[in-house]
Amino acid sequence: MEARRENRELTDIELTENALAVLRKRYLKKNDRGEPVERPVDMFRRVAGNIAEAELKFRDGEEGRALYEEYYGRFLQMMLSRRFMPNSPTLMNAGRELQQLSACFVLPVEDSIDGIYDTLKHQAIIHKSGGGTGFAFSRLRPKNDIVQSTMGVSSGPVSFMAIYDASTDKIKQGGTRRGANMGILRVDHPDIEEFVTCKNDNDQITNFNISVAITDAFMEAVEKDGEFELVNPRNGAVTRRVRARELFKKIAYGAWLNGEPGVVFIDRINADNPTPQFPIESTNPCSEAHLPPYDSCNLGSINLSLFYSEEAGDVDWEELRETVRTAVRFLDNVIEQNNYPLPQIEEMSKGNRRIGLGVMGFADLLIKMGIPYDSEEGLAFAERVMRFIDEEAWEASRALAAERGVFAHYEGSRHEARGDRVRNATVTTIAPTGTISLIAGCSGGIEPLYAVAFMRRQADMEMPDVNPEFVRVARERGFYSEELMKKVAEQGSVRGLEEVPEDVRRVWVTSHDISPEWHVRMQAAFQKHTSMGISKTINLPNEATVEDVERAYRLAYSLGCKGIAVYRDGSREEQVLSTGKTAKQPEPQPRHVSLAEARNGRPRTLSGVTKKIRTGHGPLYVTMNDDEFGPRECFIVLGKPGGTASAFSDALGRMISLALKHGATPAEISHQLKGIQDGHPAGVGPNAVLSVPDGVAKAMAEHYLVEEEDAEARELPIIGACPDCGSGLTRQEGCVVCHSCGYSKCG
C-alpha cells in the first residue's frame, strides 16, 4: 500500500481556467494590493499542513511527528488528486490568521428580548468570521400575544426574523460576501401562515432561506383531511384549529411561487438524532446539516468521478475505501484545529464531533458507468455507493475512537445505547458543492448535469463550449460534428437530437430532462445511508402546478427523506398578482426588477482597488469599487484637474459606472474598450497600452480576471445577480450558484 501511495505522489494540480479564476479571486492568500501570493498547490500544502498538525495534539515526540508527516502527505495527495475537497472555509482559512474552518452554525432564539438580541450579536460575530447561521423561531410567542413585563403585545417571529435579515445586510461575511441564513418555524406555531407567505415577495427577507418544520402529526392530518391544532409555545395553549390540507396547500403554493419555503420533517430528524439529549430545532442554511443549538457543520466531499476503473468497468472500491477513511480523519482533525467564533460553539462542536462527509461528481460517475440517472439501475447504484461510503466512514470513526476516545457527549447518545464506540456523532451528509466541485472539475453533489454544453462568447461571437467527455464520446462513436456541438450548446441538452444515438441520449441527461419523481427518488436513495440530510434541488417545469409540489412533498415524506426543496423553472422571475381573496391560484405575470433598482442608492462605504497604468499620456489611475451585487463604479484619473484629458477620463469613468450600475459586466466593458488606439501607445507587444480606454480595459481585465473567452453565456433560469461577477445566479443543489465564475452562496 505504501509503495502504491508513493507512486501516486503529486506535486501539482490540474485545474480548469474557471477553477484557477475562482481560486485567485476568493481562496489564495493575497498581499496588501489584492494580488495572490500563493499558487493553488501552495494553498493545498497550507491546508494539509495545518490540518495534519492536529496529530501532534494526540501523540508526543517522534510518534507524533511521524503521524504528522504521514497524514500531511495523505491529506495533500487527496486534495491534489482532486479526490477530496474540504468545504470552502477550510480551504480559505486553514493556516491563516482567521482559522475559522466551519461552514455553518445553528443558534438558539429564546423567547425573551435578551435572548433574541444576544443571538443577534452572535449572528453578527459568526457572519464576520465567514460562517452561515440557522435559526428556529418556534420558541417565540405569536404575534399579538401578551408580554407580561410591559403589558404590551408581541410582534411575532417574522418581525424578529426581519431584524436578523437586516443585520446580515450590514455585515460582509469574512470580508467577501453577505452571510447566509436559515429560518425555520414549526408547522404548529400560530404564526405559521404569516411565515409561509413572508417571502412571496422576492424583495422581502432576502438573506434567508426559510423552511417549515413539519411534524408526523401534521402529515397524518393531511392524509386524513383532518383539522390540526396551532399551539402557543409560551404556554402550550391551543390558539385555533386549521384544515391541515389547506395549510399544506399554502406551504406548497409558496414553494411553487418562488421556491420558498422548503420543508424539513422535524420528527424524523429527531428520531435519528444521535444525541437526543440535545434536541434539533433547525438546520444550516442549505438544510443538509441538522444541528442542535450552538453546533457546527464541518464538511468535505469525495469526487466520485475519479474512482471509475476503465479496466474493471466498475468503481475502484479499494481506492474509495482508503479515501473515505483518510477524509474522516481529516474532518475529525478540522474539529481540533478550528478557531470557533463562540465558546458555546466550541464546547458543543467538540462535544458532538459531528462531521459531514459527502460526495460530488456522482452524475459524472454514472455517465462513465453507462447508467441513466433516472432509472432503477441508477437508484440501486446510488444506494450501493452511499452505503459503502457510510459504512467505511463509521469504521474509520470507530478506529479513531479506539485511538483518541469517543466523543465527549457519548453518554446518553444512541451510539452508547447500541454499544457502538465511535469518535463522531455523525459522519455523512451531502452538502452543496458549487465552488469546490468547480475546483475539482466535476458535477455538483448528487445532482444530474446542469447542462451538456453552454454557448460561450468569444471575440463577440457565440461559440459552443461542450463537456469534453461528451466530445470524446462523440468522436469515438463517430457522430461528432461542429454543427451538432453548436446545436447541443444552444439547447444545453441532447434530448430530442436524433443525430445523437439513443443510448447516449439516455445517459447524458440534464437536470431539466428528469421528472420531479426521479429527483425525489434519487434523494431518498442517498438518504437511506446518510447520517444527516441532503441538499438537493427538486426541479419542476415552469408549467408545474401547486398540486405537483404537494405530490413531491408527499413522495419525499413517504420515501424517508428528511426534507425537500423544490424549484419551479422561471418562478423567481414572476410576480403573482391576485384580483381578490377568492382567487385560488392567481396567474403569474412577469415583473422585471432592474439591477439599478435593486441597488437602491449608493452605500456609504464600498470596497475596491486602484491600479496604476502607464499610458502615452502619462500615468493613469483606475479605481474599481464593488458592492454586494458585484462591480459597482469606476473612477479614472489622468492629468491635472480642469484639463481636457482629465475631463475625458472623468466622463469615461462616469459612463462605465452607469453601465455597471445597470448590470453590464467588467468582461463586456473590457471587450468594448480593448484595442482602441489613439496614436500614442505606451510599450510594445501584447502588453502595450494603446490608449486611455485600452489602459482601462487592461486594468478591469486584470482586476476582475477577465479571460480571453468570456463566461458562459447560455440562457439560464436567472434568479439574481452574482455578487462576485455580476452574472446571473441559478438554483442548484438546494443552493444559489453562478455558472460563470463558480460563486456559491453555500461555499
Image (cartoon, grey):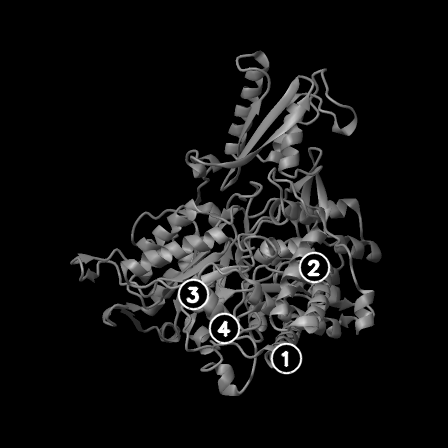
Q: Residues within 10 Å of mark 1 (few under 14, many from 20)?
A: some
Q: Residues within 10 Å of mark 4 (few under 14, many from 20)?
A: many
- Mark 3 residue type: Gln
- Percent across and percent down for residue 422 are 57, 80
Which mark is first along the chain, 2 or 3? 3
Q: Quickly name the residue at label 1.
A: 399
Task: Identify residue for label 2.
Answer: 508
What mark, if any, has residue 352 been given in the picture? Answer: 4
Q: Secondary structure at mark 2?
A: loop
Q: Position of residue 654 (x, y in %)?
A: 52, 24
Q: Nearer the viewer, residue 228 or 595?
A: 595
Between disc 4 and disc 2, whose residue precedes?
4
Of callouts 3 and 4, the N-terminal one: 3
Residue type at mark 4 is Asn
Asked if the residue at tag 2 contacts the one at tag 4, i.e. Cβ–Cβ closer than 8 Å, the answer is no
Question: Which mark is in front, 3 or 4?
Answer: 3
Query: What's the residue type where badge 1 is placed?
Result: Ala
Nearer to the camera, 537 or 358: 358
Q: Nearer the viewer, residue 668 or 632?
A: 632
Local secondary structure at mark 3: helix
Residue at the (44%, 82%) spot, across then down = 412
Q: How many C-alpha atoms fall within 10 Å of the one at disc 2: few (<14), some, or many (≥20)?
A: many
| C-alpha gap between disc 3 and disc 2 | 47 Å
In the figure, 111 relative to 408: above or below? above
The residue at 66%/17% (across/down) is 617
The residue where tag 3 is placed is: 344
430 over 416 or under it: above or below: above
**Local SS, label 1:** helix
The x, y position of residue 256, in whole percent, is: 45, 56
The reply to whether discs 1 and 4 touch (Cβ–Cβ < 8 Å) is no
